Image (cartoon, rainbow, N blue to C red):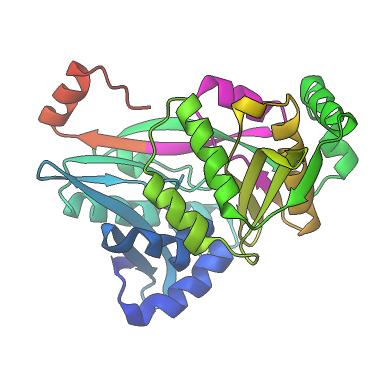
Amino acid sequence: MYMRLLKSADHAEYERIARSWGSVFDQLGWLQLYGNRIRLYGIFDNDDRMIGGFHIYIRKFLGLRFGLNPPFTSSCGPFFIANKKTMFTRNKMVRDVMKLVMMEIEKLKLALVLISFHRDIRDTLPASRRGFDVKVRYTYRIDLKRSIQQIHADISTSHRGSIRKAQADGLILRKITDMKIVELMVTKSLERNRLKKDLSFLRRILYEFVTAENSFTYCVYHHNEPLAAALCFFDSDTALYLSGGYDADRKHHGAGALAIWQSIQQARALDLRYFDFDGSMIPAIEKYFRGFGAEMVPYYRIFKAGYLIRLLLAVFAIEIR
């Protein structure tokens, strides 16, 4: 098994595998939003057949190169065709893939590495053995193979009450394609939570990547004014709540919950396996997601930096989580 950078001639096969075994974040349409900042790798077996992939986003700052997740992207892979029949052979394949990934990352000689792996990657020993710090993060995920009644019953009393109030107050729910509304809601929420994001990439996602074949968006209105929106992307088995928000100037307690509840129902109607809230370590947002009765699912982030970078992080009291 080996890894190498992909050529344009490899893209069709890569996309075929990514759509079956990867996530939305592994698809070419998503990665191409980031231009030449993405280094895209293929994973090949000993017969030179592509079996998976991995990517990393390279950002330059003050002459230094940082390896990161692309903006608005919660994982860099790796993904691969997992058709091994026994737990031993599957675990061995994960270990071998992770060894290759870590070797390629080290070859890049980056000043800082801070990336998260796919939800299904639990073996991070190849990273820790190479001196990387391994940190656990969490997302929340709903199993959509249960009945809609079971899913609804698991939602917190508070969230169910908010949804009922939104319906009783006559709020209107619409499936929309106008991404200007989503941009407005997300921007307001980012500003309210003092979160810094590169909005140029948000606009690329909204206006260049969103289609009816890979996403759905719900907006809640009152007197024809948008109150809240929820944007979800989906792949072969999972709907990902990528972003959303509400207008604090016209806030209604149940607008956001109603948009998310409808998104969960839509994901189930598409016969997907999971609805994934795509994680958050911000306490208020994490608590809000938890209220939808989802299961906490760990995923792993690795960090490594040279002495100078660590010193700067310490001086400015920047915590890597």
- Please state the extent of the stretch shown in magenta in the rendering: 275-301
In this view, 89 is above or below 149: below
Question: Does residue 294 show up?
Answer: yes
Residue furthest front in the image? 223
Residue furthest bottom in the image? 9
- Point 29% across, 61% down: residue: 39
Residue 37 % position (x, y): 27, 57
Residue 73 % position (x, y): 44, 48
Residue 167 as seen in the image, left or right of residue 41: right
- Pick the residue in front: 91 or 78: 78
Question: Does residue 80 show up?
Answer: no
In this view, 13 is above or below 263: below
Instruction: Identify the image quadrant of the C terminus.
Output: top left
On whether residue 211 falls in the magenta region, the answer is no
Residue 66 % position (x, y): 22, 44
- Point 48% across, 48% down: residue: 118
- Point 76% across, 49% down: residue: 174
Residue 288 % position (x, y): 65, 25
Locate residue 261: give its quadrant. Answer: top right
Residue 80 as seen in the image, left or right of residue 257: left
